[in-house]
Amino acid sequence: MSRSGPVGVGFIGTGMISNTYLENLTKFPDIDVVILGDLNTELAKSQAEKHGIREWGSADDVIAHPDVELVVNLTIPAVHAQVSGRAIDAGKHVWSEKPISVDRESGRALLAKAEAAALLVGIAPDTVLGPGVQTARRAIAHGDIGEPLSAQTVMQYIGPDIFHPSPEFLFAKGAGPLFDMGPYYLTTLVHVFGSVESVAAVGSKSRATRTIQAGDRVGTTFEVDVPTHVSALAKFVDGGVSQSVFSFDSPMVKMGVVEITGTEGTLVIPDPNRFTGEVKITRAPAPAAIMDPAVWEDVPITGVYAERGLGVLDLARAARNGGRPLASGELGYHVLDTMVAIDEAVTENRVVAVDSRVAAVPPVAEDFDPFAATLV
């Protein structure tokens, strides 16, 4: 049945991250958030009342709702593929928080199921669709740093157990600094360099248990199942290399470091966990000034600013207009494949090939306006 007007959206999972999604999606004219669902239906009700959503209930209620065309899956990583698969079985498009799944097999199966049903899958992060990363991409495409050669990214701090009231899932399989924060940085690198060809990595775990330091469960101890510090090298199919640090072990905070070096200069991309920020370029100094501090040029930010939810909107418009989402399931799977390969490189002490490939991701159009009503 052909539909018109805003795309009906339902949420499965109404935890902490749902707030920022709801704050934005309820402002986009092309989106109508119909219902919120959660294992804890009282939490779903509370979030619905807070954000002015008219219905709430369970995951089953969301999946069965006739007005829901697109399900936003904000569950924990271990059940991402399962919940997304149920939504696809019910004929819904799916936007899932990252990662697409916690293993390659279920990720591939999910994409195959969606393709067979002629449905679309979108995978976070959508921060890379914001004006910050997109302005940087336009500068690179313009040749402002010449041919991109290499990249360095850093994400390190002491870990989410210091602020999250229920951080256990962030230290379980499918999370840790690599799987939790890696998608922001690796997705940005794939936007710039294309598909990853192979990786090498080392990792460590600072301690076997962690203690919750915020919320009602302060003092509760839990086990750590994954490396909490990972250093990774990547080689890209079309040329280029990168080195990345992902850590929950450092009292010294370095977050949002993304530097792309080309034949004519180095470009700093804003924090890929944010939608905007400063884009700067420095060029090779004269020999006499080699030890002087870099001289930075500001690149003016272009594009309409919005927050989390851009990917859902882009997916919704693609579903109606017959296009493909920019933050696609295929891109999400390639990033998962890369992270699993990095994890294998850590545990097996070898260079690991990344078998999947993803087509070059088109840039966001400069006139993309999330606050415009385009679906009639």
Image (cartoon, rainbow, N blue to C red):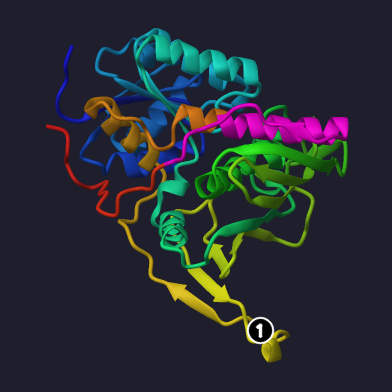
User: In the drawing, does residue 4 fall left or right of residue 361?
Assistant: left
Q: Amino acid at mark 1?
A: Pro
In percent of width and height, residue 37 lies at 42, 21
The span picked out in magenta is 334-361
Q: Residue furthest bottom?
A: 288
Nearer to the camera, 217 or 224: 224
Q: Is residue 8 magenta?
A: no
Nearer to the camera, 332 or 43: 332
Nearer to the camera, 316 or 64: 316
In percent of width and height, residue 74 lies at 49, 29
Q: Report which quarter residue 50 is drawn in.
A: top left
User: In the drawing, does residue 105 fall left or right of residue 229?
Assistant: left
- Tell me the residue that label 1 is attached to: 293
- Residue 222, visible in the rendered structure: no
Q: Residue drawn 36% across and 20% down? A: 93
User: In the drawing, does residue 60 fall left or right of residue 288?
Assistant: left
Q: Is residue 354 magenta?
A: yes
Secondary element type, mark 1? loop
